[in-house]
Amino acid sequence: MNKPDGLSIFNDDCGKILSDGSIAPDSIDAVVTDPPYGIKFFNQKWDYEIPSVEIFKKILNVIKPGGTILCFASPHTQHRMAVNIEDAGFELRDCLMWLYGNGLPKSQSLPDLIRKSINKDQIPPKELDRIIKAFDGYRTNALKPAYEPIIMAMKPLDGNYANNAMVHKISGLNIDACRLESKGKKWKTPRGGIWKTDKNAKSILMDNTVGRFPANVIYEDNDDVKESFLKSIDPSMAVHEKNLITRIFYCAKVKGKNKDDDDNDHPTIKPLPLMKYLCRLVKSPSDCIILDPFMGSGSTGVACIQEGISFVGIEREQEYFEIAKRRLFSAKETQEAKDKIKSNFLEWAKE
């Protein structure tokens, strides 16, 4: 284990660390993790299976009552991930969607597969050509990937939200800290539907001074996606108002040239702005500790350091642990230097 202040990381199997007393029961405020998806990604052995119910039970044991888990999943296996989380004792609360436009199609051409698979000596050439022509333009059952789900679940409350806040100093989500910076507009009174009780009430559009409520959809940050989304904005708003509105948090996928560490070759690294946003969303009001039992190259930990959150990370694979260790220690040194500069400036400003 390596443990500078506010940072504890383990190079071991998370099932062992979660059950051997290294992490005390009811000591973790939240979990933000990107575990194996069970899709054999790039034929990586660590991605052959999703975490078991038993693993999620061990995670449940170390989280405080009311603590939230945000767990990335694959569209192919998210149902199994969600069931395992729920069967472990968590309450499923929501499912965030990180949408992006630059996923790579992984389907195969059916005509090509037919040519490779069919024994040409056992079928007349004309019949083979007819079949191939009939399936021209067909591919195997896989659409272009354009989203990743993030399962949100909660350890059952101790009583209710109010009691949980008083007893365990944790409750709910950190909504205001995740409101969108673009203020935009909001309706002073409901426009209709189940929330409107006064038939004579007028719908008034007014300035939103606190920022927009965070949604359970996150878009990739590119012009095509934004332009498409702007088309869905309420037609009653003026054109110039549309350009000022950002209803959704935007975050680009990680690309090779955009990685914060050229030596980080983890195949499923998540973008740091996204991880910071998620960590901030589940942050408790004071002395927050976030756990990532499948730490990988340490992006959750770097996000926590930059957000002023204590971090506990576990990674079994030695290669990725060493990358995470280097990234985390570097991030901590950088953040401490920034904090010192800020502190010195504040002291100077007081004089």
Image (tube, rainbow, N blue to C red):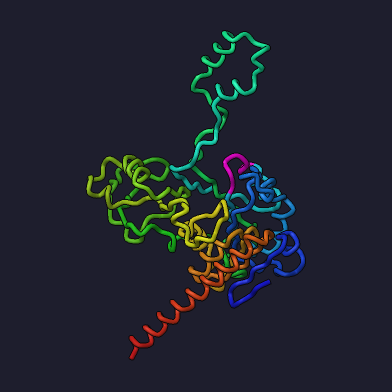
Vertical side of 8 occupied by 49: above or below? above
| Residue farthest to the bottom, as pictured | 351
Vertical side of 118 occupied by 213: above or below? below
Q: Is residue 78 magenta?
A: yes
Report the side of 113 relative to 219 (left or right). Answer: right
Could you say where residue 23 lies in the image, as x and y percent from the top left?
Answer: 70, 68
Residue 328: which quarter of the image? bottom right
Could you say where residue 44 lies in the image, as x and y percent from the top left?
Answer: 65, 48
Q: Nearer the viewer, residue 243 or 251?
A: 251
Q: Nearer the viewer, residue 41 or 310?
A: 41
Q: Residue at x 59, y 77 (%)?
A: 5
Q: Is residue 233 magenta?
A: no
Q: Nearer the viewer, residue 175 or 72?
A: 72
| Residue farthest to the front, as pictured | 121
Count of numbered labels shown in the rendering:
0
Report the side of 65 relative to 258 (left or right). Answer: right
Residue 134 visible somewhere in the drawing: yes
Q: Quadrant of the C terminus?
A: bottom left
Q: Which secondary structure dominates the residues rendered in magenta?
A: loop
Q: Residue at x 68, y 71 (%)?
A: 1
Residue 174 visible somewhere in the drawing: no
Report the side of 181 relative to 115 (left or right). Answer: left
Could you say where residue 168 lies in the image, as x and y percent from the top left?
Answer: 61, 69
Q: Residue at x 54, y 70 (%)?
A: 309
Q: Residue at x 57, y 62 (%)?
A: 298
Vertical side of 82 occupied by 169: above or below? below
Report the side of 226 relative to 267 (left or right). Answer: left
Q: Nearer the viewer, residue 107 or 58?
A: 107
Could you say where residue 202 lies in the image, as x and y percent from the top left?
Answer: 28, 46
> Residues in magenta?
73-79
